[in-house]
Amino acid sequence: MVIRIWRILATCSILSSLGAIASPALSEPTKIDLFLTPNSNQPYENVVEEAETVATISIDQELSQSPETTKIYLRVFGDVKGQIVPVLFSKVSRSDWQQDPRIHRWTRYFITSGLLLGFDNSSVSPTNIAPTRSRIRLEDDPGFRDD
């Protein structure tokens, strides 16, 4: 009877240690939503720069404060008079961020958001905003195969 109890305890101990080892692989990505209230008198490019700065700081803080975080999904919204519109979306893993912490590499920009938030359309220019993943040639993508 005593041997059986020890077998059960040993089995529980092994299973719990395996669960502790497997838990980081099953971790959920961290999701962060940030809201900016920009001044509509400033150019939209300034709003995007502010969003990038806030996103960079938030990603750095999350990765330094939470070692279990492996991937971050971060959204920055602009809020002008109750009109809430996405400004940018970043998806980055810890290893990617450690290799290259430039926010524009991991970010999708919503260029028309400036118009929706009431910014002057002359200030919204795709050439003034860092390139998105969709503007990169397929041949430059590491996963591209030309069979």
Image: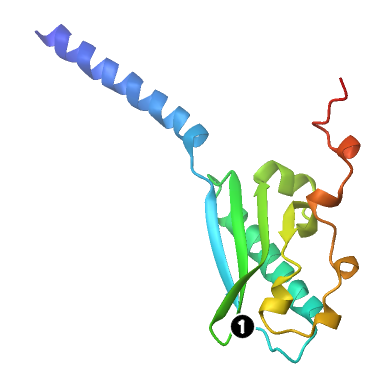
Label 1 sits on what residue type?
Thr
> The C terminus appears in which quarter of the rendering?
top right
Q: Which of 125 and 17 is in front in this view?
A: 125
Residue drawn at (86%, 67%), measured in percent from left and top? 126
Instruction: Estimate the x, y position of residue 62 in percent, counting from the top left.
Output: 58, 57
Instruction: Estimate the x, y position of residue 11 in percent, counting from the top left.
Output: 28, 16
Q: Name the residue under label 1.
A: 37
Q: Nearer the viewer, residue 119 or 92?
A: 119
Task: Tell me the colour scheme of the image.
Answer: rainbow
Image quadrant where residue 23 sits: top left
Secondary structure at badge 1 equals: loop
Pointer 1: residues within 10 angstroms few (<14), some, or many (20+)? Answer: few
Q: Is residue 103 above or below residue 53?
A: above
Instruction: Estimate the x, y position of residue 130 in percent, counting from the top left.
Output: 84, 62
Q: Nearer the viewer, residue 88 or 22?
A: 88
Q: Is residue 113 above or below residue 17?
A: below
Q: Nearer the viewer, residue 5 or 33?
A: 33
Image quadrant where residue 33 sits: bottom right
Q: In this view, does 139 lie above or below 3?
A: below
> The N terminus appears in which quarter of the rendering?
top left
Image position of 97 (left or right of 7): right
Q: Residue furthest bottom?
A: 41
Residue drawn at (66%, 59%), measured in percent from left and top? 89
Residue drawn at (81%, 76%), measured in percent from left and top? 45
